[in-house]
Image: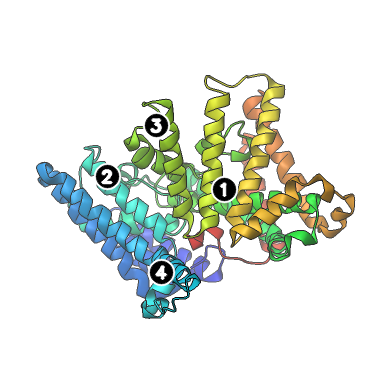
């Protein structure tokens, strides 16, 4: 079920009408959340609901056994890892690996038919499987580390696992942050309801007005041949996609955070203006924060983090980013995307071992270079083949293909939107890094109410072509 659909509006209206009547009775509230979440997820394809239950059941049991029998906790953690990663592998990577193996054999003249032997159920990638698998695993990891005491209430646990606002595209919530809020949610008073509405309005504006308006141009650009256009066109296309994926994904997160506030819970921020970052270390502290912190806490630091030798630190960084690339998809172009960011951060550590200058000109230059390199990496995130991505990157850096006539092929709406969002990011940069003070009237309740009403009106009358959220594919 899409947030930007009539079905969801009806679904959410019914849920939030019933929710206040059950908010003071824990098990009934958990049951309502579970049932609503199953309807929300099953709307896409009810057959894959069993994956959510299997993943949750494994971690519910292993969490209890780790706590109850600490001498054997490594074995129970292994069961959790094999169960969850086995499911993720079967549905996300099995077809890709078998297909690749079949192509290798075919190149040696060996005819095999392995794909046909795979059950068709594995041919479809379940929506959000990577998100709820990592969310479920974090529960077991935290119990294993002694940072969380497992819950014995299965309804509470499955309410956490299936929580519909962030189920299929994040933010990835941690049990240690949310279980207590599920037990004792805050009362959604007028201030929380308005704050939730404000976040939802901003989220919908980002998605249906900005991201969906950029989507037709981006789709057309990346469907064309790299040699059909020159440098300017491809830079505009790359920048347009960078903002499309940012506003699409951060819009979903904002809606999820707003819905969470209406349920009496505070989900953590998932995006914090990543394109004003002056380094890639800073970029990953601002982009998809819940996922980047997940990789940091459960992969990078357990590998040794930056506590070991310089060579080992770089190796840990590369392993983490390559796994991050594979998490996004079973394809070589995602691996290249992860490798590029690993290379960027490795070079930063070598060139700037201590700290970066606070000089404003240096900050502007490093921010622009970070953004440009990020756009290049996002080319590989968007394309469906490595060869195609390399063709676009060649066009981006080839000065012989520079022509101002390319501007004529770019829709005026795209140029207007990009100008507006870049100007907005420049203001945020000036505020956060240049010390610019925000006008006081921005915080005025009347102005905020007017802004929310304006955003919702624009969403209704000036929305782009409706599209599914980009991160549903992960």
Q: How far from the left and from the top, in percent, is residue 68?
A: 11, 46
3D distance between C-alphas at marks 2 and 4: 31 Å
3D distance between C-alphas at marks 3 and 2: 23 Å
Which residue position holds label 2?
141
Residue at screen point 52% across, 22% down: 353
| Disc nearer the start of the sequence (1/4) | 4
Is residue 386 toward the left or the right of residue 59 in the image? right
Is residue 451 toward the left or the right of residue 312 in the image? right
3D distance between C-alphas at marks 4 and 3: 33 Å
Q: Are marks 1 and 3 in contact (CB under 8 Å)?
A: no
- Say which of marks 1 and 3 sits in front: 3
In the displayed image of the protein, which residue is found farthest to the right? 405
In the displayed image of the protein, which residue is found farthest to the front? 108
Which residue position holds label 3?
312
- Say which of marks 1 and 4 sits in front: 4
Which label belongs to residue 198? Answer: 1
Residue at screen point 29% across, 53% down: 24
- Determine the image quadrant of residue 351: top right
Q: How far from the left and from the top, in percent, is residue 43?
A: 43, 72
Question: 55 or 394, which lies in front?
Answer: 394
Q: Are marks 2 and 4 in contact (CB under 8 Å)?
A: no
| Disc nearer the start of the sequence (4/3) | 4
Q: How far from the left and from the top, in percent, is residue 147?
A: 25, 37
Is residue 279 toward the left or the right of residue 161 in the image? right
3D distance between C-alphas at marks 1 and 4: 47 Å
Which residue position holds label 4?
98
Disc 2, SS? helix
- Say which of marks 2 and 1 sits in front: 2
| Disc nearer the start of the sequence (2/1) | 2
Vertical side of 403 occupied by 370: above or below: above
């Amino acid at each position: 079920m899409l947030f930007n659909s009539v079905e969801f509006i009806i679904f959410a209206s019914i849920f939030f009408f019933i929710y206040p009547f059950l908010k003071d009775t824990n098990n009934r509230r958990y049951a309502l959340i579970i049932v609503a979440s199953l309807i929300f997820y099953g709307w896409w394809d009810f057959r894959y609901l069993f994956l959510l239950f299997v993943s949750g059941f494994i971690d519910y049991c292993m969490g209890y056994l780790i706590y109850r029998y600490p001498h054997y906790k490594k074995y129970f953690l292994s069961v959790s890892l094999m169960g969850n990663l086995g499911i993720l592998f079967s549905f996300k990577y099995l077809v890709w690996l078998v297909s690749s193996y079949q192509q290798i054999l075919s190149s040696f003249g060996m005819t095999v038919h392995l794909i046909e032997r795979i059950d068709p159920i594995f041919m479809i990638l379940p929506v959000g499987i990577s998100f709820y698998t990592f969310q479920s695993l974090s529960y077991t990891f935290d119990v294993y580390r002694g940072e969380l005491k497992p819950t014995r209430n299965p309804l509470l646990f499955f309410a956490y696992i299936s929580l519909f606002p962030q189920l299929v595209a994040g933010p990835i919530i941690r049990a240690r942050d949310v279980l207590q809020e599920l037990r004792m949610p805050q009362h959604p008073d007028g201030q929380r309801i308005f704050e939730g509405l404000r976040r939802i309005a901003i989220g919908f504006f980002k998605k249906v007005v900005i991201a969906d308006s950029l989507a037709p141009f981006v789709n057309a650009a990346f469907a064309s041949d790299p040699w059909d256009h020159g440098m300017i066109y491809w830079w505009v296309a790359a920048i347009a996609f960078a903002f499309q994926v940012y506003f699409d994904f951060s819009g979903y997160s904002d809606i999820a955070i707003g819905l969470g506030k209406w349920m009496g819970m505070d989900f953590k921020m998932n995006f914090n203006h990543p394109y004003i970052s002056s380094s890639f270390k800073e970029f990953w502290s601002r982009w998809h924060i819940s996922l980047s912190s997940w990789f940091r806490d459960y992969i990078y630091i357990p590998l040794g983090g930056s506590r070991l030798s310089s060579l080992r630190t770089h190796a840990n960084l590369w392993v983490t980013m390559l796994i991050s690339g594979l998490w996004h998809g079973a394809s070589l172009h995602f691996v290249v995307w992860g490798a590029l960011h690993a290379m960027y951060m490795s070079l930063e550590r070598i060139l700037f071992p201590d700290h970066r200058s606070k000089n404003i000109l240096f900050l502007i230059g490093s921010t622009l270079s970070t953004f440009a390199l990020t756009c290049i990496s996002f080319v590989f995130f968007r394309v469906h083949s490595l060869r195609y991505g390399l063709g676009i990157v060649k066009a981006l850096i080839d000065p012989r293909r520079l022509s101002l006539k390319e501007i004529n092929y770019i829709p005026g709406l795209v140029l207007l939107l990009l100008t507006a969002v870049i100007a907005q990011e420049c203001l945020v940069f000036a505020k956060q890094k240049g010390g610019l003070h925000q006008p006081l009237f921005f915080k005025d309740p009347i102005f905020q109410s007017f802004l929310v009403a304006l955003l919702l009106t624009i969403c209704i009358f000036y929305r782009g072509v409706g599209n599914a959220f980009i991160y549903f594919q992960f």
